[in-house]
Amino acid sequence: MKYLIPSLLSLFLIFVTTPQTRIRADDSKRPNFVIIMADDLGFGDLSCFHGWINTPHLNQLAKSGLRLTDYHSNGAVCSPTRAALLTGRYQQRVGIPRVIVANPKAAEHRNGLPEKETTFAEALQQQGYATAIFGKWHLGYFPQFNPRLHGFQEFRGYVSGNVDFFSHVDQAGNADWWHNQQRVNESGYVTHLITAHAVRFLEEHQDRPFCLYLPHEAPHYPYQGPHDKADRSPGGSFANHGSRVDKKQAYREMVEELDKGVGQIVQKLQQLEIDQKTVIFFCSDNGATRLGSNAPFRGHKGSVWEGGHRVPAIAYWPGKIKPRESNQTMLSMDLMPTLLALADANADKFAFDGIDVSEHWLAAADLPERTLFWDTTKSQAVRDGAWKLVQQNNSKSPQLFQLTVDPKESKDVSQQQPQIRDQLSTKLKNWKKAVQSAR
């Protein structure tokens, strides 16, 4: 018996200190993540941002969480923002400064997210998280760029910039719907499919930490509501924006359907009793086209005016994030360092351009001052506190705006503030050199 007791004690100590046991103990403290991104949704679209489309489920998230009024997409178009969101780095460093297009003859068609870049999915998977992406990838058409090779254990969706919501044909006329690395046929309205797979994933992974990325197509063209029909067929000819005459009404229907999907996800989290340990982050990849609204800001998708990149965003974590509004400046590239901090993962090995904003989310801590940059094919911008400089490629003279008193960017004060203008111009030039040399 005297030998049996130490043996049993040894077995007990081995059991309680094994890595697997420690991981399970840590899991109870680490939150789940659901990242929902709309496509081409403007600051003035959602009713919770004083917009024209009634979105009751997003309204509830905004009411119960953190409504971000100075959140910006890293890019003014699709692919660049997605690269920054996933890596925590400026898209220019990542090598995706422009849209990756569907036309196989275009040089940008061959681009994609490099293997050397680490995504938040890869980093969290290494911490024991289950990961998945359902929806729009738009970070590379070729097999070596597939989401499965960038940390996502499951992929359902499309790799191009947009597909028909019913036939899932891209604007080059190719069928574009995937399950992992295989092209598949799956009937259904894209928004509904994204939500259905999300709900299934939550049910399957409710007992372990997970990171679920839901990049929606809505309200990007083709403008098709849930009761419309397919406009595109493989190899056929079609209007990219769809056959609906009342496209603004279709846009509204698309946003409303996205909002319903958000409601279904929240409801499922509550049913599974994991809502209290799940962070939901909602945003858009850039500003709206002229069909939507970027009110009260100037500009639209594709521009470096505020309307091109200041977008609606909400951070929600019941019991952890107190309901309030924040006017602190945040960008897409802040998401990855924030997720890793919330997951208590070591981020020292990553060269982030974004910052961890978790203390602001959880405790309303002020964010540090920093200089921020936007760069499109036609213009560039640099933001430093209240000051924003805009440089158009077709103009030798930059424009300067003081956003705290002129958020609509209506009064150029570059002549009145030449020192600030020149300082920001120099910072912009130096930043462009730095990100180009990093590629």
Image (spheres, helix red, strand yellow):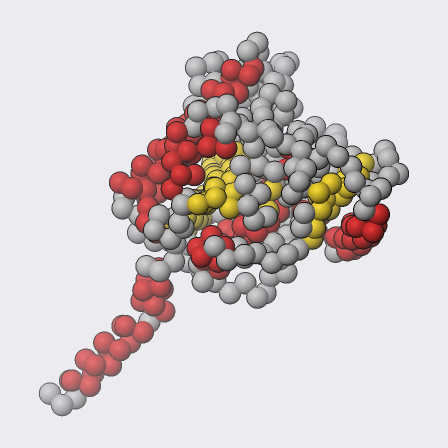
* Image coords of residue 141 (percent x, y): 62, 36
- Residue in the image at 58% along x and 43% along y: 70
Residue lying furthest top: 245
Q: Is residue 394 left or right of residue 13?
A: right
Residue lying furthest right: 396
User: Is residue 427 among the parts visible in the rendering?
Assistant: yes
- Residue in the image at 27% along x and 72% along y: 15
> In this picture, is 79 found above or below 162?
below
Residue lying furthest left: 1
Q: Quadrant of residue 404?
A: top right
- Residue in the image at 60% along x and 42% along y: 72
Q: Quadrant of residue 311?
A: top right
- Residue in the image at 44% along x and 24% along y: 54
Q: Nearer the viewer, residue 307 or 5?
A: 307
Q: Nearer the viewer, residue 176 or 93?
A: 93
> In this picture, is 107 found above or below 438?
above
Picture mark count:
0
Q: Nearer the viewer, residue 259 or 25?
A: 259
* Image coords of residue 310 (percent x, y): 61, 38
User: Is residue 174 among the parts visible in the rendering?
Assistant: no
Q: Is residue 140 left or right of residue 189?
A: right
> In this picture, is 404 found above or below 189?
below
Q: Is residue 112 left or right of residue 67?
A: right
Q: Quadrant of residue 189?
A: top left
User: Quadrant where the N terminus lies?
Assistant: bottom left
* Image coords of residue 139 (percent x, y): 62, 40
* Image coords of residue 64 (percent x, y): 38, 42
Q: Nearer the viewer, residue 172 or 371?
A: 371
Residue lying furthest bottom: 2
